[in-house]
Each structure stands twice: as structure tokens, then as C-alpha cells.
Image: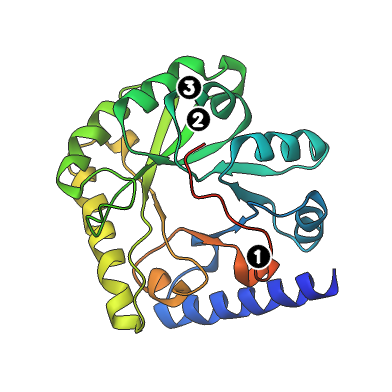
Amino acid sequence: MEQTKKNIAAVTARINTAMADAGRDENSLQLLAVSKTRSVEHIQQAFSQGLNAFGENYLQEAVTKIQALEPLAVEWHFIGPMQSNKTKPVAENFSWVHAVDRLKIAKRLNDQRPAHLGPLNICLQINIDNELSKSGVAPNEAVNLALAVSELPNLRLRGLMAIPMSRQDIDSQRQPFRALRMLKDAINTQLDNFQKLDTLSMGMSGDIEAAILEGATILRVGTDIFGPRTDPVDNKEI
């Protein structure tokens, strides 16, 4: 508990410094605690320190946690890749989905979203570095996908997400984030005012400062909040 408290305080201080350096309002950024492979107790500890948004990659594990923590006012984000036969429980249990990269997935989420929950918030995952090993729509195909997803009534297209290649210095780290921001701006020129994107889900423990400088609105941070993982991480799609 005490270590989690210290970790969150350190991450918050780092974010506040970067936000001040960027001349940004502190309310323009959300810290998303990446809780995949972490226990219910870890999430409860982080929640007690003021965090209320948690990101999960693995569906079965996530649903178990959502059910266990139902009394808490947690905002759940699904941030992992998704097979089409698993969209229904995602549509039923989450407030946000960060990794939509195909219209087929978006349509299934739209059709399976319970009406009483309201529209599901969506970010398109962009393969910003065009890496063969990563999911995501190619940047030159993003506008068409965004226009199609924006027409689905049970989804609310909020923005873009990316996981760039690892880079060591802040100037290099800023480049893919800048490209993502420019892509968001380009998509917005094609959307009506009420549809315009307002979200950039980018930046993790190793590149917080670069992401903030380029306009991140959601930071996905796991290790610097919960500490190093001891469990093996399954990189397969759910």
C-alpha cells in the first residue's frame, strides 16, 4: 500500500512538471492506470489514492476484476487487441475501447452495446511507425476508418491511440506523438463540429514527458504505478 502511494505521488509529480513545462492545464490530461495482470487489491490501493480509470488487456481477467470491484466508481478502459468473437463482453463491460483498428470490430461493438449504457467511447489504434509486429490501422487509412466509425450510433469516436517504437531521447520520442496529433487534426477537418476528436491516448512510463509536450490527453501508465511485473505477460490477442 505504502509503495503504491509513493509510486503514484512520483508519477503525479512527474506529470505536473511536464504539464507546467508544456504550458498546459492540468485538467486536460487523464492518468489511466494500466492494471493488466495486477490484482484486485492493487487496483483498490490505487483507487484509494485517487485514481479511478484503469486499463485492461485480457478480457477474462478484466471481467473478473470488474465484477469484484463493482461497488467502486471505476471507469474501465479496454486497451488490448480484440478478436471479433470477443466484442460482446467488451461492449457490455467497458466505458472506453482504445484499440479499434478494423471497421468489422467497430460494427460489432456498435451492435452489441447495451442501450442503457450509452455510447461506447472509441479510440482508433494507429500503427504510427508501420511496424509489422504491431496491430493498428496504417496512418494513410485512418481517415476513411474514422469517417466510417463516426457514423455508428452506439459508439462515440473520441480519438486516436498509438504505441510507438521505443526511443531513447525525448526529441525522438516526440516525433511519432507529433505525427499522431497531426493525424488527429487532419481527421478533424473531415468531421462535423459535434464529431471532432478530442482524445490522444499516447505515452507510457518511459515517455510521459514527450507525450505531454505533443498533446496527450490520456497517459497509459502501469509499471511506474504498480511496479515491475512478476507474472509472465501473454502477448496473444484475447
Above or below, 143 relative to 118? below
Q: Circle 3 is placed at which residue position?
A: 85
Q: How many numbered discs sit on the rendered protein?
A: 3
Q: Where residue 204 appears, x then y in whole percent?
A: 49, 66
Which residue appears at 45% of the width and 23% of the height?
109
Which quadrant, please, contains the N terminus?
Answer: bottom right
Q: Nearer the viewer, residue 2 or 51?
A: 2
Q: Circle 1 is placed at which residue position?
A: 229
CA distance for labels 3 and 1: 29 Å
Q: Mark 3 Cα within 10 Å, few/some/many (few <14, many 20+)? A: few
Which residue appears at 68% of the width and 71% of the height?
227
Q: Nearer the viewer, residue 21 or 1?
A: 1
Q: Is residue 40 left or right of residue 184?
A: right
At label 1, the amino acid type is: Arg
Q: Where residue 98 appears, x then y in whole percent?
A: 45, 44
At label 2, the amino acid type is: Leu
Q: Are marks 3 and 1 in contact (CB under 8 Å)?
A: no
Which residue appears at 38% of the width and 58% of the height?
163
Marks 3, 2: nearer the viewer: 3
Q: Nearer the viewer, residue 169 or 114?
A: 169
Above or below, 23 relative to 94? below
Pick whichever of labels 1 and 2 is earlier in the sequence.
Answer: 2
Marks 1, 2: nearer the viewer: 1
Q: Nearer the viewer, residue 158 or 134?
A: 134
Q: Circle 2 is placed at which residue position?
A: 120
- For the question of whether residue 153 can be seen, the reply is no
